[in-house]
Amino acid sequence: MGRIIASDSGNLDLFIEYDKRQKRIVCYSGGHSSAIVAIEVCRRYGSENVVLLNHDIAENVEDLDIKRFKREVADYLGKEIVFANIQDLEGDALPDQFDVCIKAGAFKVGSGSELCTSRLKTEPFYKWLSENTDPANTVIYYGFDPKEIRRIQRRSGILGSMGYRTDYPLALWKDRTIFNTGEIGIDPPLAYGKYKHANCKGCLKAGRLHWFITYCDRPDLFEKAKRAEDEIGYTILNGQSMESLEPTFRKLQEAGVEGNEHIGGVSFWSQVKRSGVLLEPDSEDLKPCECVF
């Protein structure tokens, strides 16, 4: 997918040179998988034409240790991180997911996709691609693993329709060189202690397990979610507001229910049932995070 294979013309040198000129865009989220992809791509092709493309996220919702992690991996590779941010904003000027939704007066857009992903990631991503790349000479890399075939198919289809080739080293490359950044002395983000991903805290796509963790660990974000629901006039979760969930979450916390995405949705809901607290299972907790570029 991401490599130019020599044709039977026999002019191998020409194809190798063309391969070196390819612009290789790593969708560099700040998570562990995208970091491994960045390392694999640089090791295979050299780092000269590799771009580590990131959407910087407001510090109040992106763990500072994630920012540390993506800087350390970029330094290891000798690369600068290239940012494609909403309206080219930086630092304290960056809005979080609640800010962009309050400004737009909605949590979702069009077909029902979350507005925060569109504003903070998708739109800046396509804008950057249109201004900085030639689809015929660009390969875009994602950190999807072998269990995420549907996501691979979806990304391949979307970007393929725009003329871009995509590649998925964690799922498709057999000759891998690294599986954990600990192998190069870089600790994965501390956020993975409780979360399965390195996306925003207070994720608007997540289910009640994530929001229970947010209630326990980030009451400031839980309060901001309540204010956003009040201002917009809609709930983040289907049919249940954060304000209505707050007493239930308080009881779960007092009952010692564990707030950790790694235990899995099934285990979490089993704990909820044993606690005697009345809360219906949420199918959103069984889905993978879909917040991509």
Image (cartoon, grey):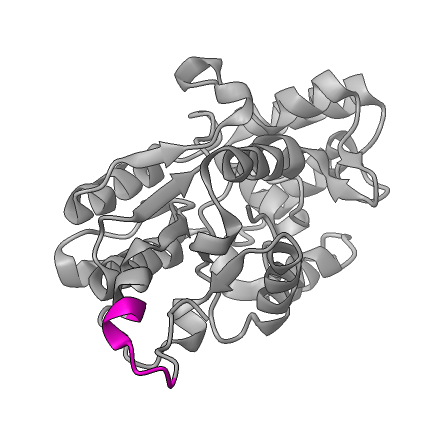
- Left or right of 74: which side holds 142? right
At a point 79% along the width and 21% down the height, the residue shown is 105
At a point 27% along the width and 63% down the height, the residue shown is 40
Does any portion of residue 202 appear in the rendered image? no
At a point 43% along the width and 14% down the height, the residue shown is 92
Q: How many marks?
A: 0
- Left or right of 71: which side holds 3? right
Residue farthest toward the left in the current orientation of the protein? 185
Query: Residue 188 versus residue 152: which sits nearer the camera?
Result: 152
- Left or right of 181: which side holds 155? right
Does any portion of residue 161 appear in the rendered image? yes
Residue stretch rendered in magenta on the structure = 8-15
At a point 57% along the width and 33% down the height, the residue shown is 127
Residue 51: image x %, image y %? 34, 44
- Would you identify the image quadrant in which residue 30 lies? top left
Residue 217: image x %, image y %? 48, 36
Query: Residue 113 versus residue 264: which sits nearer the camera?
Result: 113
